Image: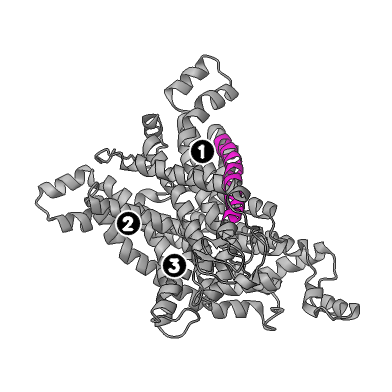
Amino acid sequence: MPMNTQLPEWLFVGLRTLASFVVVVWGLSTLLFFILRINGDPAALLAGPYATPDQVGLVRRELGLDSSLFVQYITFLGDTARLHFGDSYQLRQPALNAVLDRVPASLLLAFAGIALAALIAIPAGIYAAVHRGSKRGQLIVALTLVGQSVPGFVLGVLLIRWFSVGIPIFPSFGFDGPLSLVLPTVTFAAFLAARQTRLIRTYMLEELSRDYIMVAQANGYGPFRVLFKHALRNVAIPVIALLGIDFGVYFGGAVIVEVVFAWPGIGRLMVDGVLQRDFPLVQAAIFVIAVTVFIVSRLVDLVSNQIDPRLRTSA
Amino acid sequence: MSTTLSTTKPAEIRRRREPKVPRSNAGSIAGIIGAAVLAIAIIAAVAAPLISGFDPNAQKLASRLLAPFSYGRDGLLHLLGTDQYGRDIFTRILYGGRVSLSIGLVTASLAAVIGIGIGTLGGYREGKLGAAVRGVLDIQTAFPFLVIAIAVVGVIGANVLTIIVVLTLWTWLPFARLSFSLAQALKRADYVKAARSAGASDGWILFRHLLPNMAPALLVVWTFVVAQVIIAESGLSFLGLGIQPPTATWGSSVSDGRDYISTAWWVAIMPGIVISIVTLAINLLGDALRDRFDPQLQVGA
């Protein structure tokens, strides 16, 4: 509980969140800055294999790569703070704009995937908990284990083989109308659904053995009311909280899904940037991804605190 | 053992009751199958030259894209067919297993040593050290690690060492988190208090009392981490950011085969199936170990 002489609690929590945000962004930027300069000369790469040393020097000066590492670092931190990531070497446009152009496609895939996963995981998890020990309940648990074991890129390639090549229903790459969303969404949702189903089942089993469930049943409430109104609400809290914690991991999975299906999102842009040594593009992409992951995980924190007052941090 | 672990969890973890699941041995059978498949995979990778007579990198352009169970121009049987350079897919899967399995086992073990060390010290000492460890763990949670791994490995250059280091920086977290909360809880256990009042040193308490009691739960985590690392490593290889060609890796084989998915599906699908089976085997083993040691454990659930 906040003391009277101290800051109000919401301000304290807000400041602490801001501080950890700054630390995350600074740590990430520093890591990237040094790693991106450990080896390889971007100026030589950009100028091309037939460039004269003079031409390489010109490119190097243009990009500020000729000053000392320390000066580069300070300049870089200042630029990051002002969201100046420079122009993408390949695309010849501001890197941040190129990345932000790809945000809608990535968010579309992420939300479609999470929604589909929830549609599968909630009923499957509840069923597996209620019918624990039954053949079907065990089948669901076994399927979740398979879902967690098949890597996204393997599932993606399998789906392309079956539904783009075998029976040509869905396009195998690119973003062209709602049908092209189907295979990437299914691939992304499979892993998520498997994990969420297991979580919902575990927490549901725990809730169902609690006294208040017995009281509700003794009051004569039907099984649906007991399950959905009483048990599911309590199950939702840890499941949502873990969704927030795992969001960064899911983003890694989404990168691979985007590459498999040539989806025009941030992830594929970043992988292209890495393969082309396009530093500004990689930095801007990682910055945007890290900020997104941070905001989402804090929002999820906030939501679960609102649902469950017991989780609120008392400074 | 399992009761010790489940009853001494820290206060903020909500109290759980034993779900009344009828005990069956279906789980342990699945675990034995998982262990057997993993053992076969490891033996096959180690003994690759004895199992297959083919050179994994030998190109035979006359025998390109042969279907599984077909014979090459030289009359030799290609069990799982050949790829676009006429290389034997079965042989490349055997040799690819060396990369994935060794990176998986080494990374998970390295991460375990680091994570258990830092987590146990933080949880046991608490105070400023504990707060610092907890702070690092909290901040790392918000890091999109695989995304950073892609950038780091891609830029530094993909070799075994880089991949192991980057994946260790990601996977020490679950070990640290679990050992932090276990150590924090176990130091308040009666037998630890008894040992301390009998004059036991911190080192004695850590190595004779805490770590042995933490070991089963940490072994379960280790198993799941091996599976995660194998998936991550093959994912990096798939993106072209793993061990570079011509070395055979499972991920890069799937990626190579993508271009031939409509004409020669086996080039991509065969290594993909192998990755999935090996990962599934490890996850089955982990599940069985968890059920055996501590059904309440939330790792990998």
Instruction: Tell me the distance, in whole angstroms, between the alpha carbons under discs 1 and 2.
Output: 26 Å
Q: Which residue is mark 3?
A: A188
Q: How many marks?
A: 3
Side of A240 relative to B84 (left or right) = left
Give the image quarter of residue A42. bottom right
Q: Which residues are magenta?
A: B94-122
At a point 12% along the width and 54% down the height, the residue shown is A221
Q: Nearer the viewer, residue A159 or B192?
A: A159
Circle on res. B179: 1
User: Seen in the image, is A135 located left or right of residue A296?
Assistant: left
- Left or right of B39 on screen, residue B110: right
Q: Quick one: which residue is furthest to the bottom in this view? A: A177
Mark 1 and mark 2 in contact? Answer it, CB < 8 Å.
no
Residue type of the residue flagged with mark 1: Ser
Q: From this viewpoint, is residue B147 visible?
A: no
Residue B141 to residue B235: above or below: above
- Residue at the spot 66% in from the left edge and 58% down from the top edge: B55
Residue B85: image location, x then y, percent: 63, 70
Residue A272 in view here? yes
Label 2 resides on the chain identified as: A
Q: Chain of mark 3?
A: A
**Circle 2 sits on which residue?**
A236
Residue drawn 85% across and 69% down? A67
